[in-house]
Image (cartoon, helix red, strand yellow):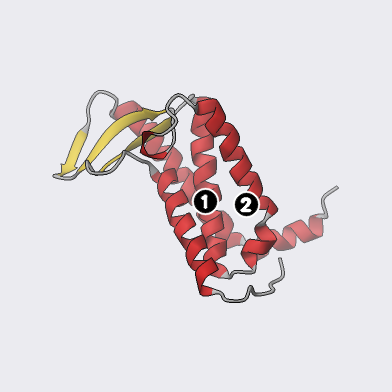
């Protein structure tokens, strides 16, 4: 049974994480719903090297593991479980690593939602020299960089209270 006073304290202490995660999920979902409705047959150039191009991605980054949706769903759940399980360790590496973990979880949830409900991930941000991606992918990438920076810039892990 959850310790509700402790849960409430954690939520009030970490409201910024929850708001950023909620905002990231909202923006990811809203842009994907828009892309599903507006882009499938009409790619839109916004600049010479930036287009909005609808792609149904059943694989991972850079076109790897195409048609591997079931495996990638399991991998995504495992990655999310690992981050939650190792959260106490991530916290010890400072705020930068913590924000990175929050962003990775946010992006993973956004893409996992697509994989489960649609059977593919909606990608639409197209720089023409890079694989097409979405807001959730951006959260995962920025989050991974932040976790890396946090790990590299803290020679000794800090002890922080959850």
As rendered, which of 158 and 9 lies closer to the eye?
A: 158
Query: On the rendered structure, is 60 left or right of 98?
Result: left
Q: Where is residue 150 shown, x and y percent of the image?
A: 52, 68
Q: Which residue matches tag 1?
A: 104
Please tell me whether residue 32 is drawn above or below residue 143 in the rendered image.
above
Please tell me whether residue 108 is drawn above or below residue 15 in the rendered image.
above
Q: Quadrant of residue 156?
A: bottom right
Query: Who's the residue at 22% across and 27% down the image?
Result: 42
Question: Which quadrant holds the C terminus?
Answer: bottom right
Q: CA distance from mark 1 to mark 2?
A: 9 Å
Please tell me whether residue 83 is drawn above or below residue 63 in the rendered image.
below
Q: Residues within 10 Å of mark 2 (few under 14, many from 20)?
A: some
Q: Which mark is residue 15?
A: none
Q: Where is residue 37 shown, x and y percent of the image?
A: 34, 27
| Residue contact between numbered discs 1 and 2, judged by CB atoms under 8 Å | yes
Give the farthest residue toward the right.
1
Q: Residues within 10 Å of mark 1 (few under 14, many from 20)?
A: many
Give the farthest residue toward the left.
48
Element carrying mark 2: helix
How many numbered marks, from 0 up? 2
As rendered, which of 75 and 137 lies closer to the eye?
A: 75
Q: Which residue matches tag 2?
A: 83
Q: Kindly tell me whether residue 19 is visible in this rendering.
A: no
């Amino acid at each position: 049974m959850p310790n509700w006073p402790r849960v409430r304290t954690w939520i009030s202490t970490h409201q910024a994480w929850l708001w950023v995660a909620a905002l990231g999920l909202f923006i990811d979902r809203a842009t994907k719903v828009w892309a599903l409705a507006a882009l499938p047959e009409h790619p839109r150039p916004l600049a010479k090297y930036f287009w909005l191009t609808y792609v149904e991605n059943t694989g991972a980054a850079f076109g790897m593991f195409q048609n591997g949706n079931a495996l990638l769903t399991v991998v995504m759940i495992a990655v999310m479980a690992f981050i939650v399980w190792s959260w106490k360790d991530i916290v010890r590496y400072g705020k930068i690593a913590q924000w990175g973990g929050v962003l990775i979880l946010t992006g993973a949830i956004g893409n996992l939602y697509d994989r489960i409900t649609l059977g593919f991930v909606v990608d639409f941000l197209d720089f023409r020299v890079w694989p097409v991606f979405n807001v959730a992918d951006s959260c995962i990438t920025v989050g991974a960089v932040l976790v890396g920076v946090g790990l590299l810039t803290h020679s000794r892990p800090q002890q922080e209270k959850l």
